[in-house]
Amino acid sequence: MDRLSGVTRLPAPGRTVVMGILNVTPDSFSDGGEFLDVDAAVAHGIALFGEGADLVDVGGESTRPGAQRASVETELDRVVPVIRQLSAAGVAISVDTMRAEVAVAAVGAGAVLVNDVSGGLADPDMLPAVADLGVDYVAMHWRGHSDRMADLATYGDVVREVTEELADRVWAAVAAGVDRRRVILDPGLGFAKTAEHNWALLRGLEHLAGLGRPLLVGASRKRFLGELLAGPAGQRPVRERDDAGTAITALLAASGIWGVRTHTVRPQLDAIAVADRMSMRTTWAGPVDR
Ligand code: PMM
């Protein structure tokens, strides 16, 4: 069954969705500074789409641990021209922002999905704005801004607490008028989470799937992979973590995950094709009402 049909302008590939990352920032941990120039950003977005990304996720504010916030003007200047051009070129765009003002401008410029790493907590205007816009909405698990999130990584049972906190975000979104069928949930790997927390969440995604919404996971190039693959010289460098990210995609696709957020596209599509062909789907694949 088509997992995305009916309620949305999102692409409906009939497999795990691949969201390609385009950070228009000077300081993101993996690609900071590479795509600050509008032309370079647009070219990279078109390349990701050309490789088969279902969505290109455009962000103008780094959320790496310890990052300071960009001003709203800076964020708008970074993302809006890029989204306008990519959208005009036929690329399906999501906007990675915690700010309602940026979400509204981005959708005005052609974005079809709002990816909010704060799940509506950073800006009280976000959920009402998403309700008005009538677009799909990713609510990620989040406990606080990057400058203090390391201090917030305390859990008794991380899977239970993240599930409960995401359930609250679904309720808040619905209370603000967002159509529940438009909400996608994300455990927020690395956001107020240690490597142990990330692995526990990946093992326990079935519990998050119990909330009845599609799940998106962003593991690509994150520090916990650098720690997993560390050698005598220390953490595996950011650019050498992609094979591990692809392995995660294969395992998640085999479980029927809705989507993955990733810096590389083609290897993820290959991994998804393998997982689907082997038909290893387990039972927690999540809802298919989209
Ligand atoms: N991670 C980052 C930024 N945005 N959005 C979602 N939905 N999920 C994530 O895990 C996520 C995100 C940080 O990673 P990046 O600097 O590589 O973009």
Image: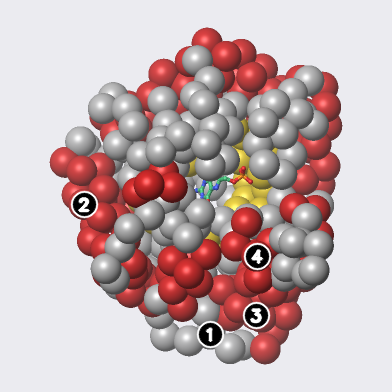
Seen from the viewer's position, the closer of residues 125 and 198 is: 198
Amino acid beneath label 1: Arg
Seen from the viewer's position, the closer of residues 264 and 157 is: 157
Q: Secondary structure at mark 3?
A: helix
Discs 1/2, front: 2
Above or below, 16 against 67 in this view is below
Q: Residue 174 occupies which quadrant of the picture?
A: top left
Q: Earlier in the sequence, mark 1 or mark 2?
A: 2
- Label 4: how many Cα within 10 Å (few below 14, some 14–19, many 20+): some
Q: Residue 91 occupies which quadrant of the picture?
A: top right
Q: Is residue 202 visible?
A: no
Q: Earlier in the sequence, mark 2 or mark 3?
A: 2
Between the residue at mark 1 and the residue at mark 2, the CA separation in whole angstroms equals 28 Å
Are the two marked residues, 1 and 4, in contact with CB atoms closer than 8 angstroms? no
Amino acid beneath label 3: Asp
Percent across and percent down for residue 47 are 82, 42
From the image, tell me which residue sits under label 3. 276
Tell me the number on the disc at residue 281. 1
From the image, tell me which residue sits under label 2. 168
Q: Earlier in the sequence, mark 2 or mark 4?
A: 2
Tell me the number on the disc at residue 227. 4
- Label 3: how many Cα within 10 Å (few below 14, some 14–19, many 20+): some
Above or below, 260 against 232 in this view is above
Q: Using residue 289 as the reference point, say whether residue 30 is left or right of it.
A: right
Q: Using residue 12 as the reference point, say whether residue 212 is left or right of it.
A: left
Q: Secondary structure at mark 4?
A: helix
- Label 2: how many Cα within 10 Å (few below 14, some 14–19, many 20+): few
Residue at figure coordinates x 72%, y 60% from the top left: 235
